[in-house]
Amino acid sequence: MSGGTTRSVGLSLVIPVYNERDNLPVLHREITDVLKSFGNGYEILFVDDGSTDGSDTVLRGLRDADPRVRVVTFARNAGQSAAMDAGFRSARGDVVVTLDADLQNDPTDIPRLLEALKGTDAVVGVRRTREDNLVRRVSSRVANYVRNRLSDERITDTGCSLKAFRRAALQRLVLYDGLHRFLPTLLKMEGFRVMEVPVGHRPRRHGESKYGIGNRLLPSFMDLLAVRWMKRRKLRYEVKDDV
């Protein structure tokens, strides 16, 4: 890991990055514009998930120019769940906000999530209008329906990466590959409160999507079965006495 200082901050932005070179300077500029009046201090924690397009060079430049930028660099691609986990473990803020590096999440929604977080433990963004192609929109809707049915959940948009958490809640989680899609469910299993708020969604400007039906359908279904098993097998007991 590199960049930044050891001081504590009020807010950590955790941003997984995989081959998003052209989007990174724009994202950094948008974030700093939105948070310039944030009073408790913040850090932008990029997790480079083994990029091969020169994203690491861009991130080093951003880090050198802005002391609020920190960079965690993986030796090789490990996946979004691993990037999230590394970001959560490295974050210093009392509040953690996650978003994608592809510019489809709008940083102007961050203050709305932070305001909503005052009354709960986690806030999940719900994309009002999906700026994706028809296949991705339909497949996402079907996936959300199946996921909620099998896991006995009511999360509207599990695929939205724009979320806010109290770091104390995240510290209770143990993530496995693919389980970043189930963060709200995992938190609720630990007794934390989760609410949803509407957020925007923008079309991709540069680069290509890393997910499609081919590389998401079967792995996501297997992850869903694992979460379903975890919910059913979770230990639930109340100590009446301990003498």
Image: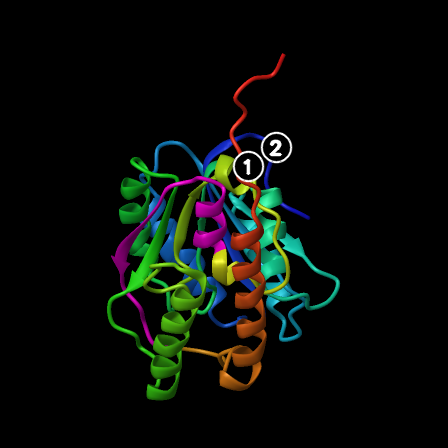
Q: Is residue 195 inside the magenta stretch?
A: yes
Image location (x, y in percent) of residue 228: 52, 61
Dot 1 lies on which element? loop
Amino acid type at mark 1: Arg
Res. 31 visible in picture: yes
Q: Relative to residue 66, is residue 203 depicted above or below?
A: below
Residue at point 30%, 61% (across, down): 126
Q: Is residue 204 magenta?
A: no
Q: Residue furthest top?
A: 243
Inter-mark Cα distance, 2 to 1: 8 Å
Left or right side of 35 for 6: right
Magenta range: 183-203
242 vs 224, nearest the viewer: 242
The quarter of the picture where residue 156 lies is bottom left
Q: Amino acid at mark 2?
A: Thr
Q: Nearer the viewer, residue 5 or 237?
A: 237
Say which mark, if any, is on residue 65: none
Residue occupied by mark 2: 6
* Mark 2 or 1: the one toward you: 1
- Bin the neighbour count of mark 2 within 10 Å (Cα to Cα): few under 14, some 14-19, many 20 and up: few
Label 1 Cα neighbours within 10 Å, binned few <14 / some 14-19 / many ≥20? many
* Percent coordinates x, y for residue 201 in the rendering: 31, 68
Reading the image, the residue beneath label 1 is 92
**Secondary structure type for disc 2:** loop
Q: Residue at x 53, y 30 (%)?
A: 8
